[in-house]
């Protein structure tokens, strides 16, 4: 199935391809780590990377939002494959520009990225294609939005900024007063900048959240293994929403039957929607869902790997990831054999910095990384870290963001994987370190907190 590799114009018959990865999070560290293991790859380059990515890739100091700089970097390095990790450069059209410049790219163009970058855009498509979702209305004037809210008879209502707001643009409002405050914060006070020039007011869905990840070239679909993050900052799903405080895969509470149902009622219709709308889409479609009594319904689309979900997926992926990425970029995904997955469980604990998610402290020296990485089954991926040269010229790793590290561990059981991940976590030291202690046992932990209350 890989014979097409030898005939593509940009392929290198000596199997010494460079791969350029854009981004600087735990997601990109795990992707660089996995891509670097491929026999097809001679070198991984990452822009802008972080302190840990430097161990598995050559760092190029170009920001992920500097589109001209990234094109110039690609022109200089001539990578055989470019992978774009985060949503911002995708929404800004980096994939289109790279493709126009002749590069092979994993990641959707600006139009496809609108699925994540505009909730009004995606809601309109979802509704037109009759994919199950929460009913919603969109507004570009706060007065109209408030007028609509005054007529609402059921509460809560969900008020959302239309654009990219780093997961912070969603307000679950218990009553009219709260909802008006949210509308003003988004539209009048500009709390999310231009992302809030439009809003959605959405029906509140009741159920368990789940997600599904698929790689698609716009035609063929490769459904990835079930994986689940923990969104709230503190144990028992308490506290503010974050980008993700931990992850586990597989997901025992998600039965095969429900996963099939998600595939059939949500995922495949979504791919069909892309095809019908003629949106060229070569990358990851990540669907956030609510499992309601009436079946799975879409909460949101994302157009990239989740972080920290990606870290758990690449640890469980036994096959070479590079042929999958290339086939997606080339539009030949249907020729690829199904990949092999490790049957063991991966648990990933995020080591965060005090103050996350509101105002994380930065610049604290991190130690114990080597000892922690030596724990059996453990692999540590950096997110908010950077190298800092101290006064005696010695380089040290310091914290540089709210989510500092993802500490992943494999184990034959969830308990074993958890034990290893937390053992490694315990060996890492920096001021202000914190984590959730219930990663991988979301439901049990929630029950315990509820029964204590
Ligand atoms: P989003 O950024 O759209 O994924 O929303 C962030 C979080 O808000 C989701 O993970 C859900 O927990 C919650 N949420 C969003 N939309 C709804 C909804 N319609 N009903 C209930 N919860 C929602
Ligand atoms: N962990 C959720 C996300 O990447 O959006």
Image (spheres, rainbow, N blue to C red):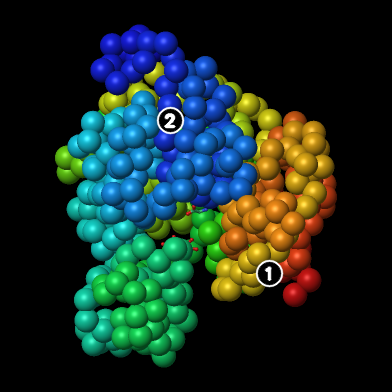
Comparing 399 with 224, the one in front is 399
Kindly identify the residue that appears in the image at 39 percent across and 79 percent down: 191
**How far across and how far down the image is residue 19, in percent?**
43, 30
Check whether the beta carbons of the residues at disc 1 and disc 2 lie within 8 A of each other: no
In the image, 395 versus 433, the foreground residue is 395
Residue sitting at x 53%, y 50%: 25
**Image quarter of residue 185:** bottom left
**Residue 92, x across and y down, in percent:** 28, 54
- Regarding mark 2 in the picture, which secondary structure is present there? strand
Can I make out residue 135 in this image?
Answer: no
**Residue 344, located in which quarter of the rendered image?**
top right
Q: Which mark is residue 354?
A: 1
Residue at the far bottom: name it: 177
Residue under the image location 46 percent in, 63 percent down = 167
Q: Where residue 211 sits in the image (x, y, percent)?
A: 48, 48
Q: Residues within 10 Å of mark 1 (few under 14, many from 20)?
A: some
Can you say whether 252 is above or below 155 in the image? above
Relative vertical location of residue 220 with respect to residue 373 in this rendering, above or below:
above
Q: Quadrant of the N terminus?
A: top left
As drawn, the label of residue 438 is: none
| Crowd around label 2: few <14 · some 14–19 · many ≥20 (10 Å) | many
Q: Quadrant of the C terminus?
A: bottom right
Judged from the image, the quadrant occupied by ligand 1 is bottom left
Residue under label 2: 19
Q: Nearer the viewer, mark 1 or mark 2?
A: 2
- Distance between the Cα atoms at labels 1 and 2? 35 Å
In the rendered image, residue 434, in percent from the top left (x then y), is placed at 73, 63
């Amino acid at each position: 199935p890989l014979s097409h590799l030898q005939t593509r114009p940009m392929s290198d018959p000596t199997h010494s391809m460079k791969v350029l990865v854009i981004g600087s999070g735990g997601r990109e560290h795990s992707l660089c780590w996995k891509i670097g293991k491929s026999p097809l790859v001679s070198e991984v380059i990452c822009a802008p990377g972080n302190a840990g990515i430097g161990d598995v890739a050559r760092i190029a100091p170009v920001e992920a939002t500097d589109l001209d700089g990234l094109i110039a970097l690609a022109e200089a390095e001539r990578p055989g494959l470019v992978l774009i990790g985060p949503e911002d450069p995708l929404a800004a059209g980096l994939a289109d520009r790279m493709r126009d410049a002749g590069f092979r790219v994993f990641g959707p163009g600006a139009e496809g990225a609108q699925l994540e970058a505009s909730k009004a855009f995606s809601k309109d498509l979802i509704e037109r294609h009759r994919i199950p979702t929460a009913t919603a209305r969109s507004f570009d004037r706060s007065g109209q939005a408030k007028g609509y809210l005054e007529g609402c008879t059921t509460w809560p209502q969900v008020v959302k900024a239309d654009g990219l707001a780093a997961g912070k643009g969603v307000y679950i409002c218990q009553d009219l007063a709260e909802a008006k405050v949210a509308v003003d914060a988004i539209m009048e006070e500009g709390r999310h900048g231009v992302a809030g020039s439009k809003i959605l007011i959405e029906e509140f869905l009741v159920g368990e959240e789940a997600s599904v990840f698929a790689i698609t070239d716009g035609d063929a679909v490769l459904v990835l293994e079930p994986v689940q993050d923990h969104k709230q900052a503190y144990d028992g799903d308490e506290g503010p929403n974050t980008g993700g405080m931990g992850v586990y895969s597989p997901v025992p509470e998600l039965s095969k039957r429900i996963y099939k149902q998600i595939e059939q009622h949500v995922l495949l219709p979504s791919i069909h929607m892309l095809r019908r709308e003629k949106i060229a889409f070569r990358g990851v479609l990540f669907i956030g869902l609510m499992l309601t009594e009436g079946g799975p319904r879409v909460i949101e689309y994302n157009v990239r790997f989740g972080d920290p979900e990606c870290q758990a997926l690449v640890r469980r992926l036994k096959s070479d990831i590079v042929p999958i990425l290339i086939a997606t970029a080339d539009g030949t995904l249907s020729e690829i054999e199904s990949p092999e997955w490790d049957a063991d469980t991966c648990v990933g604990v995020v080591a965060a910095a005090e103050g996350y998610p509101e105002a994380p402290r930065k610049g604290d020296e991190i130690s114990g990384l080597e000892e922690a990485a030596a724990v059996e089954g453990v692999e540590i991926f950096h997110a908010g870290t950077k190298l800092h040269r101290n006064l005696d010229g010695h380089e040290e790793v310091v914290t540089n963001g709210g989510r500092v590290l993802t500490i992943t561990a494999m184990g034959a059981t969830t308990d074993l994987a958890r034990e290893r991940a937390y053992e490694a976590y315990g060996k890492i030291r920096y001021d202000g370190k914190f984590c959730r202690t219930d990663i991988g046992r979301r439901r049990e932990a929630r029950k315990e907190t509820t029964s204590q209350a």
